[in-house]
Image: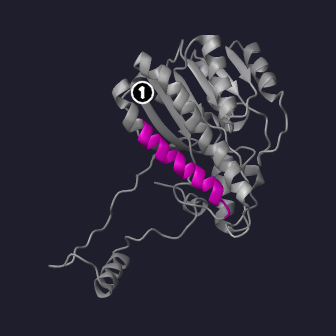
Amino acid sequence: MDVKGSVALVTGGARGIGLSIVRSLAEGGARVILDDAGLSIDGREEDPTLAATVAADLRKEGWEVRPSALNVSRWEDCQALYRFARETYGKVDILVNNAAILQDRMVFNMEERSFEQVLRNNLFSAFYLTHLCSRDMREGLQGRILNVVSTSGLIGNRGQANYGTAKGGLVALSRIAALELARYGITVNAIAPFAHTRVTETIEPTTPWLAEYLATVKNVAPPASVGTLVRYLCSARAKVITGQVFGVRGGEVFLFSQPRPVGVARTAGKETLDEDFLAQTFDTWDKEGLFTPLETDLMHFSRRFK
């Protein structure tokens, strides 16, 4: 999985999943710009020196990693980050949008500021950098964009209206960008990772299924597997793989379905619907098991797959 000579920009790259991605790309020979504003999980400023410290440690190991502490939730910081990449290496070949924060509240308790802040950090930043970096990629007729999403945006989770909306929007952005950029040799994929990080440390095992979920993550899901998948999708062997949503959990890799109709019913000789028709249709779909279960992503992935 050689990405030697490529220039990679990874946001949220100083810890956990982001660091595993930075390390994997650097080990493959990429020149990596590690951006991390050093925020706490909920987005408060925590350690603006974090990126420089981590990058220095990686350079001691022999990898070419340059730090940045810009806050990608801001358009002007994304512009500055893009300029830094161009001034340093002249291009961006690989973009990994990983930066994310959490501010969990039930929808009836969530404040407007919290909803907006999470969307700006987790979704707007990805658009900003995709908009900027795809211009270089188009000129070179090649490029890789990886968006780190979440099953909270695919399946849903209580208390995460902001986070799930951002991650669901990021899946849509990935799909649309893949459609728009395919003609230029640019691939865009989304990855929903399952890994033991500081985020999983905040989850309390309050139910048996939640305890089982945490066990599957803590015991078998180191972040390194996420980095391996990212590096593969950035390699020449994955040049035709685009517009997909993957999951990774330790030694498991998942390919997610994407929304498509699973049931259809048509009125006989009518151009409009009526209540009796809808009642009969919904009853049929219910009996056929076509309705999506009302379960959270953690409930769904507390089970092991065969």
118 part of magenta stretch: no
- 140 versus 10 height, above or below: above
- Image coordinates for residue 135, horizontal then vertical, percent: 48, 23
Which residue lies at the image location 54% right of the left edge and 41% below the top edge? 251
* Rendered position, 303 above or below 186: below
Q: Main secondary structure of the magenta part?
A: helix
Q: Residue 165 in the image: state x and y as whole percent.
A: 58, 55
Q: Report if residue 162 is visible in the image.
A: yes
Confirm whether the magenta stretch covers residue 174.
Answer: yes
Q: Residue furthest front?
A: 76
Residue at 53%, 13% (x, y): give it: 4
Looking at the picture, tell me which residue is in the foreground, 104 or 285. 104
Quadrant housing residue 185: top left
Residue 228 can be seen, yes or no = no
| SS for dot 1 | strand
Q: Which residue, given by chain and number where applicable, does mark 1 sit on?
A: 186
Q: What colour scheme governs how the chains and residues are painted in the rendered image of this protein?
A: one colour
Q: 10 Å neighbourhood of mark 1: few (<14), some, or many (≥20)? A: many
Residue 266 in picture, x, y percent from top left: 22, 74
Q: Toward the viewer: 284 or 44? A: 44
Q: Residue furthest bottom?
A: 276
- Residue at point 68%, 24% (across, down): 80
Provide the residue span drawn in magenta.
159-177
Q: Looking at the picture, which amino acid does disc 1 mark?
A: Ile
Q: Is residue 125 left or right of 14 when viewed as pictured?
A: left
- Which residue appears at 42% of the width and 42% of the height? 176
223 displayed left or right of 37? left
Give the image location of residue 129, x and y in percent: 58, 31
Closer to the camera, 59 or 48? 48
